[in-house]
Image (cartoon, rainbow, N blue to C red):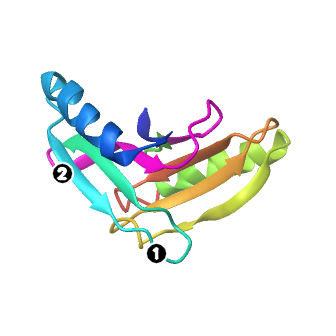
Amino acid sequence: MIDHVILTVSDFGRSVPFYEDVLKPLGLTDVTDFPGQDGHPHLKGFGTNGAWFLWLKEGQAEPNAVHVGLVAASQKKVREFHDAAVAAGASVKTAPGPQLQYFPDYFATWILDPDGHDIEVVNKTGRAD
């Protein structure tokens, strides 16, 4: 169900090699860079078979500095999540729509829960229904 998680770390030089080492036994051996630009931070991604689902960004490490991305089966389900979240009192960070700067067929919404947690729901299949 979870698509990806971003953890804020205080030192890439220490954390990237650490995660490269500790994730190998789990079969998570692919590492990629997402260069920071246009206000988006530089990220290091970890995963397997071209799918990166644990990301690190450098900054002040705090428990509330976690971003959670959940998988939806279709773009319709992304919209349904968005509508239900708004109905339940969430603030909208980004309305449902294509986010092709991240991945082909990336369709997502971001909301802030009542405590301000940044929750994303994403569909990457291009499936509308």
Q: Please identify the quadrant where the N terminus is shown.
A: top left
Please check the rendered image and state whether residue 60 is part of the magenta-colored stretch, yes or no: yes
Q: Quadrant of residue 101?
A: bottom left
| Residue 10 spot, x, y in % from top left | 48, 42
- Identified at 39% across, 56% down, the residue is 43
Which residue is drawn at the image coordinates 45% and 50% (left, top)?
57
Q: Residue at x 32, y 46 (%)?
A: 13
Check disc 1 and report the residue beneath it: 37
Query: What residue range appears in magenta?
Result: 49-69
| Residue 52 appears left or right of 62 | left
* Residue picked out by circle 2: 50
Residue type indicated by callout 2: Gly
Q: Residues within 10 Å of mark 2 (few under 14, many from 20)?
A: few
Q: Position of residue 41 (x, y in %)?
A: 49, 62
Q: Are marks 1 and 2 in contact (CB under 8 Å)?
A: no
* Left or right placement of residue 117 versus residue 101 in this view: right
Between label 1 and label 2, give the one nearer the viewer: 1
Q: Which element carries disc 2, helix, strand or loop?
A: loop
